[in-house]
Amino acid sequence: MQIAGNEPAIREKLRQIIQRSMMGPSAQALSENERALRSGLIAAQLMGLAFMRFVWKIEPLASLDDDAIVAAIAPTIQHYLDSDVYAATREAPPAE
């Protein structure tokens, strides 16, 4: 992950993977911008967690049981997948 941040080719490949794979078939009804926003939020959540646990080894996340991690972040990921991500601001998604 550290290399991906510094290598343009690796960073671009990772960006493409994240944008294509974070949203499942249920997101097909969403606009491209909405899918990009949601997949970006999911990726940010997961990448932040990965850095905290595996790169920087910040406790207590580094040693927390996997099931506890899943229980803690699952509601947030689910929110990004199927809830109104603009509810707090009531802003419309950016125009395509």
Image (cartoon, rainbow, N blue to C red):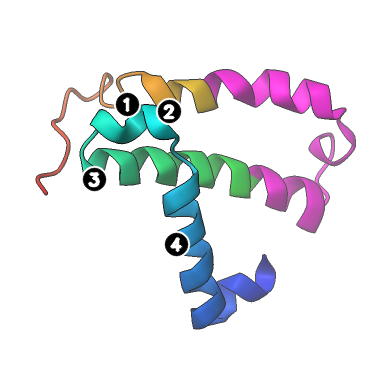
The nearer-to-camera label among 2 and 4 is 4
Q: Please give the range of residues in magenta.
A: 49-76
Q: In this picture, is 81 found above or below 32?
A: above
Q: Could you say whether the residue bearing mark 1 is in a helix, strand or loop? A: loop
Q: Which mark is residue 80?
A: 2
Question: In screen coordinates, is 5 left or right of 25?
Answer: right
Q: Position of residue 19 (x, y in %)?
A: 42, 52
Q: Could you say whether the residue bearing mark 4 is in a helix, strand or loop? A: helix
Q: Characterize the magenta stretch by its predominant secondary structure.
A: helix
Q: Label 2 amino acid?
A: Tyr
* Mark 4 nearby-residue class (10 Å; few <14, some 14–19, many ≥20): few
Q: Position of residue 33 (x, y in %)?
A: 23, 45
Sequence-wise first label, 1 or 4: 4
80 magenta-colored: no
Residues at badges 2 and 1 in contact (C-beta under 8 Å)? Answer: yes
Residue positioned 28% across, 21% down in the render:
88
